[in-house]
Every structure is written in C-alpha cells, then in structure tokens.
Image (cartoon, grey):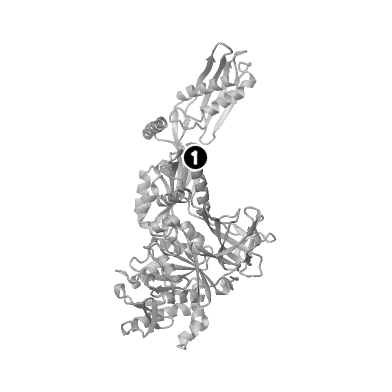
Amino acid sequence: MPAQDPAAIRNVAVIGHRGTGKTSLTEAILFASGAVSRQGAIEQGSTVADYDEDEKKRQHSINAALCHTTWRNHNINMIDTPGDPSFHADTLAALRVVEGALVVVGAPAGLEVQHERLWRHCQDNAVSRVIFVNMMDRERADFFTALGQLQESFGQGAVAAQLPIGGEDKFAGVVDLLAMKAFLFEGGKAKEAPIPEELAGQADEYREKLMDAVAENDDAVMEKYLEGEEISREEMYAALKAGVVAGNVFPVGAGCATRNIGIDLLLNLIVDAIPSPARRPPVTALVAGSGEEIKVRCDAGEPVAAFVFKTLADPFSGRINVLRVFAGELKSDTNVYNPASKTKERIGQLLKLQGKDNSPADALGPGDIGAIAKLKETKTGDSLCTESRQVTFPPLVFPNPVMSFAVEPKSKGDEEKVGTALKRLQEEDPTLVVERDAQTNELVVSGLSQVHVEVIMDRVKRRFGAEVNLKPPRVPYLETIRKQAEAQGKYKKQTGGRGQYGDAWLRIEPKPRGEGFEFADKVVGGVIPRGFIPAVEKGIVEAMKEGELSGHPLVDMKVTVYDGSHHAVDSSEMAFKIAASMGLKKAVASADPVLLEPIMAVHVTVPEENVGDVIGDLNSRRGKVLGMEPKSKMNQVNVEVPLAEMLAYAPDLRSMTGGRGDYTMEFLRYDEVPAHLSQKIVEQERKIKEEK
C-alpha cells in the first residue's frame, strides 16, 4: 500500500458521552463504505472497534481503536474513543493527532456532561467538529431538543445540515439541507425522494439558517447570497469547509447507526466539511536538546517527523506503537531516530490497523495514521524523526489519577509476574501509576476511577495469568516529637567470653516541620571513642524508622549524643548501635510524641450550582477552603484536605455533581493529626501490625 496523498486523507476522532453509540456508528461507517462485509453489533461483541474482552464484557469502549476506510476516493482514518472519563487518556491522545472530531450525541438524552468536557479539548487542540445526532429511532428521540441544547452550550454555529424524517419508531430518513433533497432508507440503502410536504416549510427555514452560517465565511458567497444569486455546489461546500476549519460552523447531522440510516450522508459531510492534513497549518515542534520551536509542514519532501500517541501491549505479539506522521514519509525497512531514548529504531513492517487486525503498508505519508510493531525503545508520547533533524512534540497531558488501591497477589509466588504485567500495562495506559510505597511497603496502583483499576486487574489476570486482591492503601503517617527530652541507652551483655557494652546519653529536640533529621556529636573527654560515634548515629537512624506511637517513621528532630561510657574490651560498634536505639526509644516516649498525616492541595472544578454542596462536603472532611476562582463556565475550589479523607472522594464528587465535577490532588505537607483521631489511628495501626 503506497503512501496516501495528504489532501485525500481525513483523520477523525469519534467522541462523545458514554452510551451515545460511537462504536456502533464507527461500525456503520465501515459497513456503509464497504470496509467490512457484515455490520457487527455491541450486544453480540462483534464490532471491529470494541475487540478487547473487557469491552465485550462491559459493552462499552475502554480503548481507542484505529480503523480506516475509503469514501469518494478519500482515505478516512477513524479513532473510536471511549466515552467513560475513566478511560479518557486515549480520547485526549486521539485529539492531538486528528484534524476533525465526529461528536456523537444520543437523540433521547441530548447533550451530556462529557460532551462539554470533550468540546473544550477540541477547542484546545483546534480540532474541527461535525456533530451527529444518533439513535433517532429510539423512544423519546428528539432532534430539535438536542439541537437547541447544542446551540445553547456551543453557540449558533451548531447548525442543522440535515433534518430527520419522522422520529422514534417512525424514523425513516433525512433531509439533506445542503442539497435540499430527501433520502428515505430501507435496509440501510438510501433512496432519493421529494421532501415530504409537512417538512417543506421547516426545511426551508433551517436551510436559510444553514446558509446564513455558511455564507459568513466567504465574502463572495455572502454577496451572492444577499443578492439572491444562485450559489454553486462548489462555492457552498468551500464556504462550509472554511467555516468548519475556522471553528465558526459545526454542521449537525441526524441518523441511526444500528439501522444504517443517514450514514452515507454523514460520510459525505466528513469528506466535504472536515479539513485534510494538507490544509492544517504547520505543527509546532521542538528541536531536541535546545527546545527551540520549529514549524513542521505536512509535506512528503520534509524530513520525517512522527508522533506516537498510543501503545498496544500484548504478551504474545509484543508492543505496537500507533503514530501520526506529520512530515516526510515513513517507509518499511528503514531507520528512524527517537530523541527521547536517544536511540535509532529499525522499522520492520508498517501497518494499517482495523481494530485488532492489521494489514501491511509500504509507506505512511504526511498526514497519515498507522502503526509499527516491535520497536524496542519507543513509547507513547515519543517522536520518531531523522537523526539530521531531531524534533519532539509537546507532551501529552493526561488527567492525574485520583483512586488508589494496594495490590496483593493472591498467590505468594506471583509478585514478579504482577510487577511485570503492570509495567507492560503502563506502556499501554499512561494514566495508570504503579508505585511501591517505601514506608508501608505496599504496591499501590492508581487510576482515574475504581472501574479503571478493576479493568487493569482483569487484564493482569487474563493476559498475564496472575490474580490479585485490591484493598485501600494505608495512609503514610509519620511521627514526631513536641518537646525536648533526654535518656540513657545502655546495652550490657555478658555471655562467658567477650561481652557487649555500649552506653550513650541522648538529647532529642523537635525541629520545624519538614526540616528532617539532624545528628550532633557533643561528646567530650573520649567517654565514647570517636570510632563508635558513627555506630551511635546509625543506631538512631535505624530506630527512627519505627516510632513508638504507631510504628511509622520519626521525622523532624535533632538528636545529640553528649555523654556515655565504654569498656576497653567489650565495647563494639554493634553494642553502641543497640545502645543508641534503646536510648532514642526512651527519649521519644517522654518527648510528647505525636502523629503526623499528609495534607493534600486539592483543586475541585465544579459547576456553579454545586459549589455549596462541594464546600460543605469538603468541610466535613476536615478540609480548609482557601478560596475560589472561575474556570470558563465552572468554578475551581482550592482546598487543603488530609489524604485520609480523600481516598474515596472521586465517586462522592461524581454523585454530588452528576458527573460534571473534576479534581486534582498533590502532596502539600505533613500536619499533626487532631488528638481525638490520633488514638483511633494508633489502635488501627497496631491491629494491622499484630495481624501481620
């Protein structure tokens, strides 16, 4: 398969709220355009895009799936994206590599929460948008209510390009307002027909609104339109595309994916309205090393510059990198350079993906999207280029994980298998964070929701054969002291032969929060020989790993060794290490020890009507609200909250805001735990320790 002409390529991300029929629409497009011979169904688990076992089981998309087809001699690369915010990493990555988005709205439900979020991401990435009101055959389907919601949220640029003929169980076809023709559908086949009389007036009204919106993007067309002159098809479509490219016009179509109604007209709209890569302005990249900005043009004669936006990990076939070529031409059996890993990569076989299946491609030209198997050092977010022009693209920005779980293998011998599996799955999903908590020694997996983490664990079991248990992670508490204290640590042991003797007097005093540990040697007169002082410090450091209250590490204290004694024969490094440890424990017990907890800086973004409920809830979590600031149509509440109160916040926020709330969280500092909670935590920690 030779490289495509970029002017004949359309790159489209299929986006929308969960349950609007994005995958069914992708399937219908593939079938209507002849890319597949049989139209699959979600319920049967037979669609091209939802091929993963998790997707078939849950009946919704979890991964972005790349598909391609041709229509009117144009190559259309479609990325079917997940609508559930738990899996939005792939959706955000897809919007970085396309010129157009097909925004799918369910006719019964209308505009939903994720539509608003995704619309903002389209704006941020300058992605042109075409809207499709799907499920017109369903009960309570209402095209005009959905259209009104679109215009209220996104402006009058959301303009009908088609009108439905009938609705619900009487939905039979669409009126194409661009061509002013009606199309009735039977068995997925379109039959041109006169516009029904009862729709004629409505069609004229909406045609005029469409022409008003389109004509504004071309002065010559506007002049003809105002003068009442005839506008040619070519002029009208050129003005339409100019409006879509400029982000002024968002044509709205109607149809039903599962019954293949309106799909061919939608394909026409994709070809006619969404810009080709050739029309895209040069993309900004950075010169590797210097960070200097450079413009990358969609031109086959330019040096190669490609961006990896997704990685597929499989225990059998290995790693597959999915990428967009922005400049130059990638060819099989050639070398490219990866500036991130500073390595050359050998391209074996280029691939065009059709869901889980693939076909070989000889070349991927500028503007095209494809894949490469078995690159050794390349991962999501990396660039591939020539060694003579090393460029990188701005990094993908993903939401931070908000739900964490401690992971325990069900079988003791599976620790290594689980670790390997999670490392491989991290390559596939950049929003998955896997860390070993040095303090609690737990393997902690963090994701965008509980469902997200559960899906990851299902994959660990299915793909890598390891089962795990999930439990809430332990909060990494610390301990410190509030006053000065002194104590003697004396270790004396006689066993018949050479004994053990170490004696050290310690003074401990608190330090300001966050300043850590300080050791001071104030021994005079050689009561403790110089050679044993490092052993004293080592004994103190080791003893600080486990405090007296709850067994958590001690921090923020100064320890001074100022006196002691030794034995000429029986003293040793080990004896002084043990003595120092004993002395520290005694001193801490009388220095008013307290428990510290991590405090997080939390930024909660919510609609204005939910601000009161959210602030009330954060106050109940011991939060300290610092203020608010407007964020577009939302409000951001800035607050400091103990980590212990935020472990299960995500589902509660979702419930309070109807899914419209978001939050980010980062560590701020450690503070004392209130006295009324401290004893309860100490008892819980001791019980955990006893169970072990």
Assign the C terminus to one quadrant of the image: top left
How far from the left and from the top, in percent, is residue 421? 50, 48
Judge whether residue 575 can be spotted in this image.
yes
Horizontally, residue 54 falls left or right of residue 581, namely left
Count neighbours of disc 1 (C-alpha within 10 A) and say few if under 14, some if 14 to 19, many if 20 or more: some
Local SS, label 1: loop
Q: Could you say which is closer to the camera, residue 654 or residue 350?
A: 350
Where is mark 1, residue-wise? 437
Q: Could you say which is closer to the camera, residue 457 or residue 337?
A: 457
Q: Could you say which is closer to the camera, residue 298 or residue 259?
A: 259
Residue that extends furthest to the top in the rendered view of this protein:
496
Answer with the quarter of the image where residue 499 lies: top right
How many tags in the picture? 1
How far from the left and from the top, in percent, is residue 484? 49, 25
Answer with the quarter of the image where residue 531 lies: top right
The residue under the point 57% across, 74% down is: 7
Assign the N terminus to one quadrant of the image: bottom right
Answer with the quarter of the image where residue 85 lies: bottom left
How far from the left and from the top, in percent, is residue 26? 44, 68
How far from the left and from the top, in percent, is residue 553? 49, 32
| Vertical arrangement, residue 248 with respect to residue 477, above or below | below
Horizontally, residue 109 falls left or right of residue 434, namely left
Q: Amino acid at mark 1?
A: Asp
Judge whether residue 154 can be spotted in this image.
no
| Vertical arrangement, residue 653 with respect to residue 323, above or below | above
| Vertical arrangement, residue 73 with respect to residue 552, above or below | below
